[in-house]
């Protein structure tokens, strides 16, 4: 674990922005690079494992608290929730871009099914990522509290 990287202004802030952006960038870069590499290899269907990418939110929530040294800001779970929301939105956008531009529907019926799938993945990914990020952030905060007690 790293020490507290908070500046005085970050400690009085609602969200530790330094920890926030660092905890968001790594899973997004990982997902885009991994899926991009597989797509370049000709396997366009890899985008359909996006629901597995929602699990990256567990890492992000933990990482956000750890980067902030256990004191992420005045409202630690708000930062973790926003982190999960942005991760879910970004993964949903990436999913939608790939399914609509690289996987053209064969029939009009396929187009409507793709639209429904895009809405479901986008709509479900946001609350799931937020919930996973908050849950793991809460567990990490509890671990830091136990370590401080002794």
Image: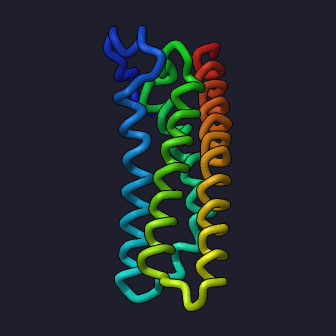
Q: In the rendered view of the protein, which quadrant contains the N terminus?
A: top left
Q: How is the image coloured?
A: rainbow
Residue at 55% over, 22% down: 76
Residue in the foreground of this view, choosing between 101 and 51 = 101
Residue in the foreground of this view, choosing between 43 and 120 = 120
Image coordinates of residue 42 in percent, x first then y, are 41, 89
Residue at 63% over, 60% down: 119
Residue at 48% over, 82% down: 103
Q: Is 55 located above or below residue 127 in the figure?
A: below
Image coordinates of residue 57 in percent, x first then y, are 56, 47
Image coordinates of residue 130 in percent, x first then y, are 61, 40
Q: Is 104 located above or below residue 4 in the figure?
A: below
Image coordinates of residue 126 in percent, x first then y, are 60, 47
- Left or right of 56 on screen, residue 113: right
Residue in the foreground of this view, choosing between 12 and 85 = 85
Q: How many marks?
A: 0
């Amino acid at each position: 674990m790293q020490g507290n990287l908070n500046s005085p202004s970050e400690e009085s802030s609602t969200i530790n922005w330094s920890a926030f952006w660092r905890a968001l960038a790594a899973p997004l870069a990982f997902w885009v690079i991994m899926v991009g590499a597989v797509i370049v290899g000709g396997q366009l269907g890899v985008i359909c494992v996006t629901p597995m990418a929602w699990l990256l939110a567990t890492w992000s929530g933990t990482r956000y608290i750890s980067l902030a040294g256990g004191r992420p800001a005045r409202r630690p779970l708000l930062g973790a929730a926003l982190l999960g929301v942005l991760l879910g939105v970004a993964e949903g956008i990436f999913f939608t871009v790939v399914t609509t531009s690289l996987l053209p529907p064969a029939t009009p019926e396929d187009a409507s099914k793709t639209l429904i799938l895009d809405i479901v993945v986008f709509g479900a990914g946001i609350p799931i990522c937020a919930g996973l990020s908050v849950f793991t952030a809460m567990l990490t905060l509890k671990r830091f509290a136990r370590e401080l007690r002794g």
